[in-house]
Image (cartoon, rainbow, N blue to C red):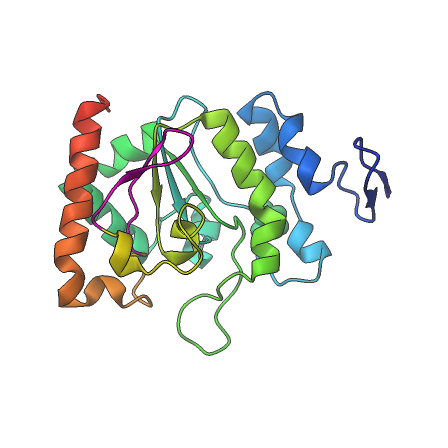
Amino acid sequence: MAGVCQCLDVFLTSPWPLCTLCLMDDYSNLEALHTDLTRCRRCAEAGYHIEGQPVFSGSQSARLMLIGQAPGVTEVKLGYPFGGSAGQRLFKWLAQAGWEESGFRATCYMTSVTKCFPGQNPKGNGDRVPSAAEQKLCRPWLDGELALVEPEIIVPIGGLAIRLFYSPEIKLEDVIGKSMVDDAGRQIVPLPHPSGASRWHSNPRHLGQIEQALFCLRMLKAEHGL
Ligand code: SF4
């Protein structure tokens, strides 16, 4: 099926009922967005390699949103974000900020820049990084999640997610360990990607910055009564 989007500006060549600009305006609640997100195959339709279903978790009442890069094979199998070895490291960090894993999962929203497993990196080290085109295809979903959940605190994990809130050239060294308030009044507290393939977090020179970021999160958790 193909047709014209409701904005009448875009002819749709895929079965998707709305163009990317209209997509986020169409959802009045997160449940409806989740129903369509779960069925999304935009990347596959555009010729990009993805495996499994989109992965995300959390409810509209969440006050903190964690945004990773993309799910891995373990997350696809389990059906929830950060369920593998990177998740173990992440929850060790979050424990330092005062969150138990079960409590964090129950109360916070967890998503990613692209929500489908992009497959292994052809060079063999970790997962493939989603291309700019895939990030663009998936962006309306993230915009929709942000608009509906309205998080007070956002924790972008890794360069891809961090650069959504900072300049595209920003280095992790310049932002990890500091929080900032964005134009929408949200506290942004970036963390490095906890995956074993990412070496930033294991560099001893960066340990102090990670500790500082976790201290920021601990303070915000107390301030916001989370
Ligand atoms: S990565 Fe995002 S846009 Fe691409 S198919 Fe999955 S949910 Fe859809």
- Which quadrant of the view contains residue 169? bottom left
Where is the C terminus found, in terms of image quarters? top left
- Residue 39 at least partly seen: yes
Position of residue 124 relative to residue 169, above or below, is below
Q: Position of residue 21 (x, y in %)?
A: 68, 38
- Residue 53 at least partly seen: no
**Magenta-colored stretch includes residue 189:** yes
Position of residue 225 relative to residue 129, above or below, is above
Where is the N terminus found, in terms of image quarters? top right
Dominant secondary structure, magenta: loop
**Magenta-colored stretch includes residue 215:** no
167, 50: nearer the viewer:
167
Q: Position of residue 204 (x, y in %)?
A: 13, 66
Q: Position of residue 4 (x, y in %)?
A: 85, 38
Q: Position of residue 5 (x, y in %)?
A: 80, 36
| Residue at image point 52% right, 50% down | 114
How many dots with numbers? 0
205, 16: nearer the viewer:
205
In the image: residue 186, left or right of residue 48: left
| Residue at image point 28% right, 52% down | 175
Position of residue 133 relative to residue 28, above or below, is below
- Which quadrant of the view contains residue 143? top right
In the image: residue 165, left or right of residue 219: right
187, 109: nearer the viewer:
187
| Residue at image point 40% right, 68% down | 126
**Residues rendered magenta in the picture:** 177-192
Farthest residue in the bottom direction?
123
Position of residue 8 relative to residue 178, above or below, is above
